[in-house]
Image (spheres, rainbow, N blue to C red):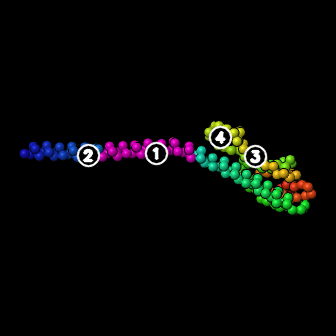
Amino acid sequence: MDTILVKKNEKNEKIRSGEKMKKGQTSIEFMIIILIVIVYLVTVTRPLVEIAYISIEDIKSLTQTNNETQKILQTINRVNNFSAGTQETIQLVIPKNSEIFCYTDGNIGFKTKIDQNKITGDSTLQCPNNICDKNYYTGNNIECVISRLVGVTKLIVEKETGTIKLRQRGS
């Protein structure tokens, strides 16, 4: 009888240790699956997030530069509606990698260097060589004392007889 009890106890211990072994194996398998998921998320999603961030920064620079150019055009139109001697001063905040240009032929334009194509390697039709360029025709006779605006600038738009004069404050 004692022999049977000993055999039953040994059998129960083997079953219990097998259950512990299965629980331990399941925990290790679960940790390996979690590790694979984390590695996948880091290797796949991180580059996508970086591309999206650069795209957002490019769009922000283009939009802000375009808005500042539009501000100049609106000021030119407002000043042009009044008599000679009218002037208006505006403050422009032009993003880095961007420039606004004044041309004596009546054009106001801007150029913005974008970074998007550094990642994808291709060039877009709208921005060859990663430089987006846009010009607006004002329809006015413009005299540009300044030809290029960058950074934070105060611009004076002044109407003289037959012409609109653009100059930086202090020039």
Q: Are the residues flagged by discs 1 and 2 in contact, CB closer than 8 Å?
A: no
Main SS category, magenta section: helix
Q: Residue at x 73, y 51 (%)?
A: 66
Q: Which mark is residue 19?
A: 2
SS of the residue under disc 1: helix
Mark 3 sits on what residue? 134
In the image, what residue type sits under mark 2?
A: Glu
Which residue bears the numbered disc 1? 38
Which mark sits nearer the N-terminus, 2 or 3?
A: 2
Report x, y in % for residue 159.
88, 58
Estimate the spatial distance between the alpha carbons at disc 2 and disc 4, rounded to whole Å. Answer: 57 Å
Residues tagged 2 and 3 counted as in contact (Cβ below 8 A): no
Q: Which residues are magenta?
A: 23-49
From the viewer's perspective, is 57 left or right of 103? left
Disc 4 crowd rating (10 Å Cα; few below 14, some 14-19, many 20+) is some
Q: Are marks 3 and 1 in contact (CB under 8 Å)?
A: no
Q: Nearer the viewer, mark 2 or mark 4?
A: 4
